[in-house]
Image: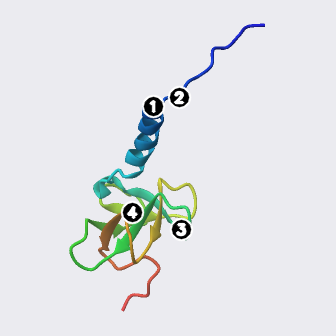
């Protein structure tokens, strides 16, 4: 039977692992890279987004087909990104060109 050497985790090693996780969770997203097939969800989103009418991080147009940069196609399955619309603590803000998807237009 082979003897496996013990694995020692030092205090600095443990701290660097913990800090690495904390730094990874604090990354900022470039909202311009979020486009394509978007699923609006109530839980477990990739990003939390606030819909605003002025000073957005990115302007978005909702399209029925051919989503590209600045265009979101709202889908129910096989999304590129899952988005939760929130009022507070968003990852970034968007201004929808034609209003919020699913909202009655006046």
Spatial CA distance of label 3 from label 1 is 38 Å
Q: CA distance from mark 3 to mark 2?
A: 40 Å
Tell me the distance, in whole angstroms, between the alpha carbons under discs 3 and 4. Answer: 14 Å
Count residues near mark 2 (Cα–Cα under 10 Å), then give few for <14, some for 14-19, many for 20+: few
Task: State the residue position of label 3.
Answer: 41
Tell me: 86 left or right of 70.
right
Q: Which mark is residue 13?
A: 1
Q: Are marks 2 and 1 in contact (CB under 8 Å)?
A: yes
Q: Alpha carbon of mark 1 to alpha carbon of mark 4: how far?
A: 43 Å
Disc nearer the start of the sequence (4/2): 2
Q: Residue furthest bottom?
A: 106
**Residue with the mark numbered 2:** 9
- In the image, 57 versus 100, the foreground residue is 57
The one of 75 and 9 positioned closer to us in this rendering: 9
Residue 63 locus on image (x, y percent): 39, 66
- Residue 65 against residue 21 in the figure, above or below: below
Mark pair 2, 1: CA separation:
6 Å
**Label 4 sits on residue:** 72
């Amino acid at each position: 039977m082979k003897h496996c050497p013990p694995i020692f985790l030092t205090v600095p090693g443990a701290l660097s692992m913990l800090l690495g996780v904390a730094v990874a969770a604090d990354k900022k997203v470039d909202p311009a890279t979020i486009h394509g097939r978007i699923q609006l969800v109530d839980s477990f989103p990739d990003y939390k987004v606030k819909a605003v009418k002025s000073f957005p991080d990115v302007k978005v147009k909702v399209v029925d087909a051919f989503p590209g940069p600045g265009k979101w196609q709202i889908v129910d399955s096989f999304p590129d990104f899952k988005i939760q619309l929130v009022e507070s603590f968003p990852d970034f803000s968007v201004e929808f060109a034609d209003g919020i998807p699913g909202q009655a237009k006046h």
